[in-house]
Image (cartoon, helix red, strand yellow):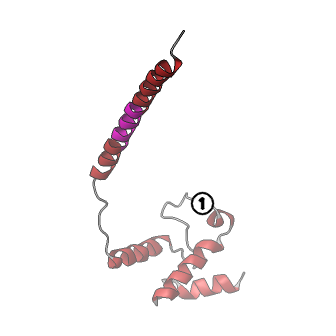
Amino acid sequence: MRRRGLVDGIRLVRFQNSISRRCRAALLALGLGALVVGVRAESPRVSPNEVLSGLRKFYAKTSRSDGSFLPGIDPDYRGMSDSAYSDLAPVTYAVTIHKSFGWKLSREKQTIQLLLSR
């Protein structure tokens, strides 16, 4: 007669050991992965003034003579989502940002005329 309790107990111990080995291996892999990700170079620090300066440069480059604005610096870029479907989206963003920061639009008269003509 077979002693099921002892055999089953040995199988259970082996199963538990294999699980714990797998768990340890998985935890080690996760830990090493986290370490590698944590070692990557830090992103450069950008001051608020640099962000504002970048916005002003962007709008200076994307401003059109008729008072409208391109959705991006590349003249062939048609925009995504709202900018691709409406030429008023970039103008709306430009006006909102300029007015929020108290800036004057580069071609304010033309922008006003453009918006009033729609």
Q: Residue at x 33, y 44 (%)?
A: 31
Instruction: Please identify the residue farthest to the top as the structure is shown.
Output: 1
The quadrant holding residue 87 is bottom right
Q: Camera-side residue: 63 or 54?
A: 54
Look at the image and tell me in which quarter the C terminus lies: bottom right
Residue 100's spot in the image, x, y percent? 50, 87
Q: Disc 1 residue type?
A: Arg
Q: Camera-side residue: 48 or 34?
A: 34
Classify 24 as above or below 1.
Answer: below
Residue 70's spot in the image, x, y percent? 55, 68
Q: What's drawn in magenta, residue-wise?
A: 20-30
Instruction: Please identify the residue farthest to the bottom as the structure is shown.
Output: 102
Q: Is residue 29 magenta?
A: yes
The kind of secondary structure the magenta stretch mainly shows is: helix
The quadrant holding residue 58 is bottom left
Residue 39 is at least partly visible in this image: yes
Classify 24 as above or below 4.
Answer: below
Look at the image and tell me in which quarter the N terminus lies: top right
Q: Camera-side residue: 66 or 80?
A: 80
Q: Residue at x 31, y 75 (%)?
A: 47
Secondary-structure class at tag 1: loop
Residue 27's spot in the image, x, y percent? 37, 41
Q: Residue at x 33, y 79 (%)?
A: 49
Q: Is residue 58 magenta?
A: no
Residue annotated with mark 1: 78
Q: Camera-side residue: 114 or 89?
A: 89
Residue 29 falls left or right of residue 15: left
Q: Residue at x 53, y 18 (%)?
A: 4
Residue 103 is at least partly visible in this image: no
How many numbered marks does the figure carry?
1
Crowding at label 1, few (<14), some or many (≥20) Cα neighbours within 10 Å?
some
